[in-house]
Image: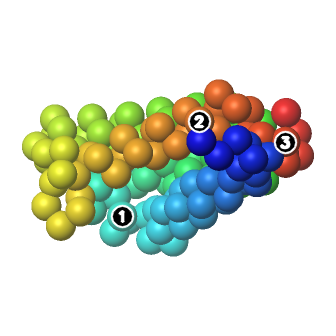
Amino acid sequence: MFPQLARFTDFALLLLRLMVGFVFVTSGYSHLKDPTARAKSIEMSKGFTIFLGVAEVAGGLGVAFGVLTQLAAFGLILIMFGAIQKKIFAWHTGFWGEKASGWHYDLIFILMNLVIAFTDGGAYVLIR
């Protein structure tokens, strides 16, 4: 319908990468700034919470800056599958959840990272 918009695809992918990166870096930072409290909140060990925080920060930075973008996106997808597993089987949270805590949010980030991975992040990346 609007073929002229296709010329903005790489810019749109950059914006998508920056948003995904921002969300994961801030989430990872929240794991790292007080891992003991965060571990209790997500019902995981402190060591795993630190690992998760480092992985989220590294993946978020990789996606945002376009450094090994596909690898970073697939890593973040694995993290989100873990979050969905926890929400469904441990916390018995439904798709919509309560107070926006459903696993629909995690599924959206899986799909966003799939777009990033399948397009290799677009043209504006640092290292493929």
**In the image, what residue type sits under mark 2?**
Val
Q: Which residue is mark 2?
A: 115
Mark 2–mark 1 Cα distance, whole angstroms, equals 30 Å
Name the residue tied to disc 1: 38
Query: Is 64 left or right of 23, judged from the image as shown?
Result: right
- Quadrant into which the N terminus falls: top right
Question: Which tag is nearer the camera, tag 2 or tag 1?
Answer: 2
Q: Which residue is mark 3?
A: 123
Disc 1 element: helix
How is this picture coloured? rainbow
Q: Who's the residue at 59% across and 36% down the image?
A: 115
- Residue at the spot x=57%, y=54% of the render? 20
Considering every residue shown, the one lying at the far front of the view is 1
Q: Amino acid at mark 1?
A: Arg
Label 2 vs 1, first from the N-terminus: 1
Q: Residues within 10 Å of mark 3 (few under 14, many from 20)?
A: some
Instruction: Pinpoint residue 87: horizontal percent, then vertical percent.
Output: 22, 44
Dot 3: what SS? loop
Separation of disc 3 and disc 1 at Cα?
A: 36 Å
Badges 3 and 1: C-beta atoms under 8 Å apart? Answer: no
| Residue 52 drawn at (x, y percent) | 49, 48
Residue 113 rendering spot, x and y as whole percentages: 56, 39
Give the secondary structure at mark 2: helix
